[in-house]
Image (cartoon, rainbow, N blue to C red):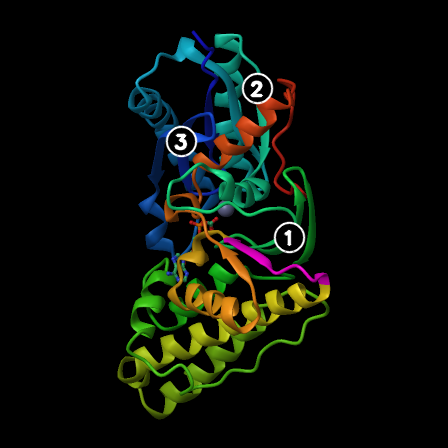
Amino acid sequence: MSVKNYILAIESSCDDTGAAIILNNTIISNVVANQSVHELYGGVVPELASRAHQQNIIPVVDQAIKQAGIEPSQLKAIAYTRGPGLMGSLLVGGSFAKSFSQALAIPLIEVNHMQAHILANFIEDANVVKPTFPFLCLTISGGHTQIVRVNDFFDMEVLGETIDDAAGEAFDKTGKILNLPYPAGPIIDRRAKNGDPLKYTFTKPRVEGLNFSFSGLKTAILYFIQKEVRLNPTFIDENIDDLCASVQHTIVTILMDKIKQASEETGIKQIAIAGGVSANSEVRARLKEGETTYGWTTYLPKFAYTTDNAAMIAMVGQLKFERQLFAENTAKSVAKYHL
Ligand code: KG4
Ligand code: ZN
């Protein structure tokens, strides 16, 4: 009988507590507990996030093991998110992973969350085509905005990143200005479908190289809205669909301009996307357009693996397990963790 290398993975970098089990590149369970507590505050509150991770971690891991139909004694290693992320949140998953691996006397594997977003593209799935090296990855979420040149599984180079807000933050913070609940990204996406993307134009930031900036756009939108609301107090309600469409169009254009520039500069036409904002319908449509306009081949992991999840941590866990890249039990969680 062949040995089955079941690997448990734990993700707790921000406000989602996740646990997953992988076997031979295939995810056999993937559990995520989202934290609704932050909705009240219009953004993630770090202290509340770490408390919720503490409550969620044991039931989430327990469920992942049960759904996989295995016993803890069958696990061969435990992978966890070492960083980047919120320190209080990282510490919960990290401490749990360390204790559990010690109790089971199995190796510990530390994972860079950003690398995991990218390598989620390699999770086995009947409907998903995996990229070949080298490719570019646009990682866009509430916490990250990066363009990465991926030469190999563990050979990656950040070509550009945001110098202030992340793309998801641009959606969420603009949503707040438009009185939409948090997280506003999916709502803006939905409302934009009925609006005119060219009705309002906002100046796009001029940023060096392949870096991004979104904070100026947020301020421009705020001033614009304040001015209009002074003239007409119901301006937002009357124009909400056009406002959503125009804001979305501006953010997506900023993203597309840079990925196009990155493709031209590197000569790489294989483009993958990752992160929660990759769910955006305009991002997807315009990326696909690039296939005909610029000759790109585009890759998108299954939706459940694009937002924060432990399946992507498990994928990296599997790749590191094959290479015997294990971590010391003394490895410290790191809020900033470069690729
Ligand atoms: O990857 P993710 O779940 O968590 C982070 O690591 O942040 O991404 C969440 C972000 C939020 O900012 C949310 O507003 C945004 O992804 N988002 C979207 C859409 N769905 C989620 N933004 C625009 N359009 C969407 N359809
Ligand atoms: Zn993330």
| Label tally | 3
Which badge, 1 or 2, is on the more N-terminal residue? 2
Q: CA distance from mark 2 to mark 3?
A: 19 Å
Q: Secondary structure at mark 2?
A: strand
Closer mark to the observer between disc 1 and disc 2:
1
| Kind of residue indicated by mark 2 | Leu
> Closer to the camera, 164 or 154?
154
Q: Which residue is mark 3?
A: 27
Q: Position of residue 266 (x, y in %)?
A: 71, 61
- The vertical placement of 335 against 180, above or below, is above
Q: Is residue 151 above or below residue 112?
A: below
Q: Amino acid at mark 3?
A: Ile
| Dots 1, 3 in contact, CB < 8 A | no
Query: How many residues crowd mark 2 within 10 Å: few (<14), some (14–19), many (20+)?
Result: many
Q: Which residue is mark 2?
A: 108
Measured along the vertical axis of the image, is residue 320 above or below residue 72? below
Q: CA distance from mark 1 to mark 3?
A: 25 Å
Q: Identify the amino acid type marked 1.
A: Val
What is the CA distance from the residue labelled 1 to the residue labelled 2? 26 Å
Secondary structure category for the residue under label 3: strand
| Residue under label 1 | 148
Horizontally, is 29 left or right of 251 in the view?
Answer: left
Mark 1 surroundings: few (<14), some (14-19) or many (≥20) residues within 10 A? many
Q: Provide residue 184's location: percent of width, then percent of height.
A: 36, 62
The residue shown at (49%, 81%) is: 223
Q: How far across and how far down the image is residue 293, in percent?
A: 53, 73
Q: Which residues are magenta?
A: 266-273
Estimate the x, y position of residue 15 in percent, counting from the top left. 42, 43
Determine whether 315 is above or below 225 in the image.
above
Whether 268 is among the magenta residues is yes
Tag 1 secondary structure:
strand
* Residue 152 on the magenta span: no
